[in-house]
Amino acid sequence: MTRKSRRLWLACACLIGLGSATALTLSAFSSNIVFFMAPSQIRAKPPAPDRTVRLGGMVVAGSVRRQTVGDTPVALFDVTDGQAAVTVRYEGILPDLFREGQSVVAIGTASPDGAFRASEVLAKHDETYMPKEVAEALRRSGKWDPRYGKAPDAASWDTMTVRNARKDAAGPQQQHGS
Amino acid sequence: MSPELGNFALALACCLAGAQAVLPLIGAQRRDPRLMAMAPALAVGQLLALLASFACLVNAAISDDFSVQNVAANSAVAKPLLYKITGVWGNHEGSILLWALILGICGGAVALFGRNLPSALRARVIAVLGGVSAGFLLFCLTTSNPFDRVWPAPLDGQGMNPLLQDPGLAFHPPILYTGYVGFAVPFAFAIAALIEGRVDAAWGRWVRPWAVAAWCFLTCGIALGSWWSYYVLGWGGYWFWDPVENASLIPWLTGTALVHSAIVVEKREALKIWTVLLAIGTFSFSLSGTFLVRSGILNSVHAFANDPARGVFILGLLALVIGGSLLLFAIRAPALTAGGMFAPVSREGLLVLNNILLCSICAVVLTGTMYPPFMSLLFGRTISVGKPFFDATAAPLAIPLLAFMGFGPMMPWKRAQFWPVLRRLWWAGILTAATFVLAAWRIRDILPLLAATFAVWVIASSAADIAERIRLFRLPLGQSLQRARLLPRAALGAALAHAGVGVSVLGLAAMSQASHKIVEVRVGQTEMLAGDAWTLTDVHAAPGPNYTSLVATIEVRHDGRLVTVLHPSKRTFASQNQTTTEVAIHTNLLSDLYGVLGDRHGTNADPTYVLRLHYNPLAPWMWLGGLIMAMGGALSLSDRRMRVGAPRRARLAGLVAAR
C-alpha cells in the first residue's frame, strides 16, 4: 500500500467519524432540544402536545394539592411568572427543596387544555439560588428586578398574577388547596 | 495567628511559583546548569509552602475559628469533625486552594521522580507547571482568598449544605481534582517539547506514565461522583448530563485518547503532533471544565459563586493558558518532524480509530454542553439539552468503539490481517453472539441491546487476549502460569482496563431496564415491584447529631423469604431549615434494591407515606467497572518498563536502551 493511499484511508476514517458525529448531533438537535417556557408563554402559545418543554417560575403559595390515584401519589401545583399561572400535574415525590413561593423548573408536556404534565420537577440544591432561566422570565415579566433584592415571597406572587387580579376584582379571593 | 501564617505561606508559594516559571526557562534556553538546577528546588519549596497554607486552613476549620470568613460561611460548631475537614474543599475558596496544592504536588513529583529526564526538558516541564501554578495562586490571593477575616467574628458559623455532609464527598473532590490537575504534567511535557522542537519515542515514554496516572484518578473521580449522586441525591439515576458532569467526561475522553496515542508515539514514532495537541487539549478541557463550572458561567448545581470579578480573572487566565499554548502549537508544530504513515489494518491503525471515535464522542458531548449557553448568549433563547440528546448521539458512536476495542490488543504492529485475529477470538465471538440472542429476549431497545452485546465482546476478547498470550490450555497449566507471571504488566493492565470498560457498559445497558414505582402507602401495606414484595412495616422519628430524622422500615420479601430490611429516612437540619433524603440501598452485586422515603400525608391518626422503590439491575457494575479500569491503569503503571526503564534519547528511532 502506498503512502498516498494510506493517507487517504486516514482522511476517510476521520471524515466518517466526524461526519457521523455531525449527522447524529443535527438529528438529535431537531428532536431532543428542550425549550424553556414561562407560564405566560405557554398560555399564549401552547407547544405541540408531544413536545417536551421546561416550564419555570414560582410555585404559587397555597396552590399545592395532593391526590392519590390508585396507589400513586399525584401532586398538583400552580407555577407563575407573575403574568399567568399554569397548573402542573406531577406523579412522584417532589424534591426536598420544593417549597411554595420558591422557584421551580418542571420538565414535561403541555396539553391543549392548558394543564402541564411534568415528568420531572427540579428544585435547585441551594435554596437561595434561583435558576437563571426563571430569574430571567420573572425579570422580563416586570414583576421583579434582581437589583432590588431577593424575589418577593409566595403570598405576593399569588396576588400578582393576572388571573388572581381578575378574581380579586370579581369577588373575594379564593383559597387554593386545603 | 495561624490564618495569617497560612496567608503568608500562600503568598510565598505564589512568589516561588513565579520564580519557578521564569528562572528554569531562562536556564534551559541559555544552557545554564545552575539556573536549570533551581527548578526542582523551587518546585519542592512551592509544595511545602502550599502544604503549610493548606494545613493552616484545615486548622482554622477544625478549631472553629469563625473570624475566618470562609470557615464562618461554611462550618458550624455542631458539625462532625470529618465534615469540618472535608468542608475545607466543599466551597469555592477552599477548592481553589486544594486545586493549587495538587498542582504543587504534581510539580514536586516531577522534581522528585523525574531525575532521569534530560535536565533541560525537566527544567522546562517544571517551569510550565510553575507558570500555571503562579496564575492560579494569584487568582486565589486576589479574588478568592480563603484566609479573609471577618469582623466582628460570629459566635457560630452558618453551617454546611447538608447534602455535602457525606463521606463520599470527603474523597470525591480530591480524587477528581488529582485527575484534572494530573493532566497538567502531560501538558507541561507537550509545551516543553514544543519549545524544544523535539518529540520522539523517548518523549512518548516519559509522558505516558503521567497521563496514565492522571487518567486513573479521573476515572475514579468520575465513578465516585456518579455513585455519590446515585446514593445521596436519591433520584434513582446515576448520571444527569449536567454541565459539571460533562466537564469531567470531556477531559476523560480526550485523556483516554491521549493514553492510547502516546503508545503509538512510543512504539512507532508516529502521531507525534496529534499527541502533543491531545495533551494540550486535555488539560485545556480540564481547566475550562473546572473553572467555567465553578465560576457559575455555565448554569450548574455545582457552581459555588456568581462573582463577575472572579469570572473575568478566570476567563483571562484560561485565555492566557489555552490561547498561549495553542499559539505556541501553531508556531512550533510545523517544525516537528512528521511521523511515518501506517497501514489501516494494524495495531496503530486501530489506535487511530480509537482516537477518532473518542474525539467524535467528545465533540458531541462538547456541542451538547456548550450549545445552550451559546444560544442564550447570542439569541437570548433559553433551551436545554438533556439525556435524550446525549443518548442519541454518544451511544451510536460508542458502540463501534467497543466493537474495535476487542481487536485492538491482539492486532500486531505495522501490518496485520483481520482474519487470523478473528480466528483467535472465535470463542469470544460465539459468547458475544449468544449474549445477543439472550439479551434480545429481554431488552427491546436497540442501543442498550447492542451495548450489552459488545460489552460482553470486550470482556471476552480481553480474556482471550491474555489466554492467548499465556497459551492457556495449549501448554500444561504450570507452564501457562509461569508465562502469566512473566507477562508484561502493561499488557495485563490494558486487558484489565478494557474489561473494566466492558463491565461498566454492561451495567449501563442493564440500568436501561431498571424499573421503579412511586406509591403512597399506610404502615403495613405491601407493594409488588420486580417480583419482590415490599412492605412498609414501621416509621419512627430518631435524633441525630445536628439533625432529626424520620426513619422508615421496609421489608422486602421474595416468595415469602425475607431478602432484606431497608431503612430509608428523611433528615431535617434545623440550622439550614433544609431536609435531605437518605436512600436505603441493598445490593447483592447483581441488582440494587433502592428505597426512598418521601412526604408524609394524611391525618395524624391515619398517616400515609410516599415511597419510591427502584429495582436497578447490575447497577453496582457501573462503578465497579470504573474501579477495574483504574486498577488496570495502576497495574500498567507498575510495569517494569515504566519504573526502571530510564529511556535515553537514542539516535535511532525505536532503539531505546533500558539502562
Image: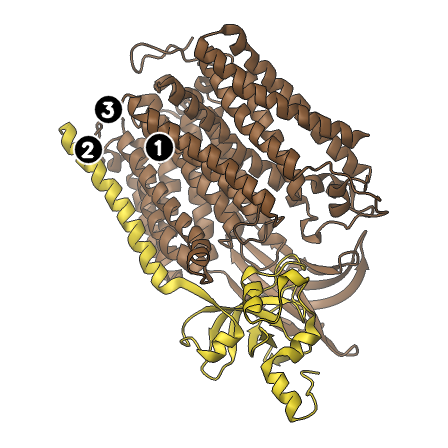
Percent x, y of residue B499 = 43, 39
Disc 1 crowd, CA 10 A, few/some/many (<14, 14-19, 20+) = many
- Numbered tag placed on residue B300 in the rendering: none
> In this view of the protein, which residue sits in the foreground, B156 or B547?
B156
Q: Which chain is yellow?
A: A
Q: Residue at x 67, y 49 (%)?
A: B164
Name the amino acid, label 2: Arg
Taking the image as drawn, is residue A73 in sight?
A: no
> In this view of the protein, which residue sits in the foreground, B584 or B129?
B129
> Which residue is identified by label 1?
B465
> Which residue is identified by label 3?
B340
The answer to whether mark 3 and mark 1 are in CB contact below 8 A is no
Tell me the SS state at disc 3.
loop
> Where is residue B41, by image quadrant?
top right
Name the amino acid, label 3: Gly
Q: Do marks 3 and 2 share a subunit?
A: no
Colour chain B is painted in: brown
B480 over B146 or under it: above or below: above
Disc 2 crowd, CA 10 A, few/some/many (<14, 14-19, 20+) = some
Which chain does tag 3 point to?
B
Which chain does tag 2 point to?
A
Q: Do marks 1 and 2 share a subunit?
A: no
Percent x, y of residue B231 = 61, 53
Disc 3 crowd, CA 10 A, few/some/many (<14, 14-19, 20+) = few
> In this view of the protein, which residue sits in the foreground, B202 or B288?
B288
> Which residue is identified by label 2?
A7
- Indicate which label's residue lies in the foreground, 1 or 2: 2
